[in-house]
Amino acid sequence: MSESIEYPALYLKRGEDQRLRAGHLWVFSNEVDVARSPLTNFGPGDPCAIVDHRGKPIGVGYVNPNSLIAARLVSRGLEHALDRSLIVHRLNVALALRERLYAEPYYRLVHGESDGLPGLVLDRFGDVLVGQTGTAGMERLKDEITEAVVKVLKPRQLWWKNDGSIRALEQLTSYADLGFGEYGGETLAREGGLEFRIDPVGGQKTGWFYDQRENRDQLARLVAGRRVLDVFSYLGGWGLRAAAAGASEVVCVDASATAVEATLQNAARNGLADRITAVRADAFEHLKALREARERFDVVILDPPAFIKRRKDMKEGRLAYRRINELGMQVLERDGILVTCSCSHHLARAALLEAVQQGARHLDRQAQALVALQQGPDHPVHPAIPETDYLKGFICRVLPA
Ligand code: SAH
């Protein structure tokens, strides 16, 4: 017989259990019956039993009284405590998927809610893991997570890259440091037969964007012998993959000097230096300069940071997508390929395509969407949580009207 966990109860108001029962994992603060279970009775990250208004338990989760998302459900029923053994189980389930998908241990191992560990991201770079906690509940479980990772993966290092902007919503501080193992050695991402040196402390996010891997795979058949522009190139993921697939020349553009320098080193490491240049510049400004200089490319890749981080950025953000796509098309050959992406979960897929369409019409060109892009399968979408479906893109052909 399984025993029941005894965590303090977080009572929901009448009817507010429905979304959770339908599969969602979040409890918003206005859904909590604060007369029965005041949020002030909980500390940030405290475990709880989430209970409906009739007193029927839904499952085990954790609370943050300071966050709009007041609680997240981690496990249905009351059989499992929030402990190392639960995390070990979740890691093994997550690992089984990735081992089916990939021949080598380079992937996102845990994608938060979608892998049953709300607020936790773990990227794997061979024997180095880079983790991010985005909630007080996960931050509190860091020791248990570390022990579970060590047990399941026996890594050389586990880094915590805890500097994401979402942490502020949970009143968590920013830091990046080694959580397990010894300092030293390099960290490499492997993708498409190439090696990229990444920086788990100073890089973007966890250091690498595995979410675009399968999308970059799609480039191969479109770039051989072509001139390629990789805008918002970071470490040159798209650009180097294009060069490896036979592009005649690749220009990478990024605002970060460190990223540009690392791109050139990565190009040299993979024997692609002769075909890659990397420019430190603002993307909008540089595209205008290329347009004025009448430079043209066969393929233009636009993989910007999220222009819509909060819903209130919607109007300005949509305009930015429209502008960058129009600028991208202005440096495309008459029959060119535009790869356009958005990682703003607030931007609907259709709205990105609309940005392409509006830009094309404004330039009196005609776009054809050839391939729809989304995040790779090591970043599963949780069907009940639209926010987990964040990466959208299209490969388009852009012709004269
Ligand atoms: N394409 C990359 C990921 C891009 S992340 C990949 O496939 O891995 C977004 C990148 O945009 C970051 O490297 C950041 O330095 C850069 N960036 C942000 N704002 C920029 C701007 N205005 N102009 C140029 N680059 C910018």
Image (cartoon, grey):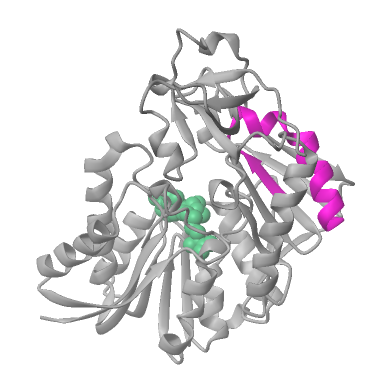
| Quarter of the figure that contains the C terminus | bottom left
- Displayed quadrant of residue 146: top right
Considering only vertical position in the picture, is 294 above or below 312? below
Q: Residue at x 14, y 63 (%)?
A: 358
Viewer-proximal residue among 367 and 138: 138
Can you give x and y, in whole percent of width and height, for residue 354 in the image?
A: 19, 61
**Left or right placement of residue 371 versus residue 159 in this view:** left
Name the quadrant containing residue 3.
top right
Q: Nearer the viewer, residue 190 or 118?
A: 118
Q: Is 365 positioned to the left or the right of 77 in the image? A: left
Residue 69, image x, y percentages:
47, 28
Q: Quadrant of the N terminus?
A: top right
Q: Measuring from the top left, give residue 76's x and y in whole percent.
A: 59, 40
Residue in the picture at 36% in, 60% down: 286
- Looking at the image, the residue that sits furthest to the bottom is 225
Characterize the magenta stretch by its predominant secondary structure: helix
Q: Which residues are magenta?
A: 130-155
The reply to whether the magenta stretch includes residue 346 is no
Residue 200 appears in the rendering: no
Above or below — where is 273 with respect to 117?
below
Quarter location, residue 98: bottom right
| Picture mark count | 0
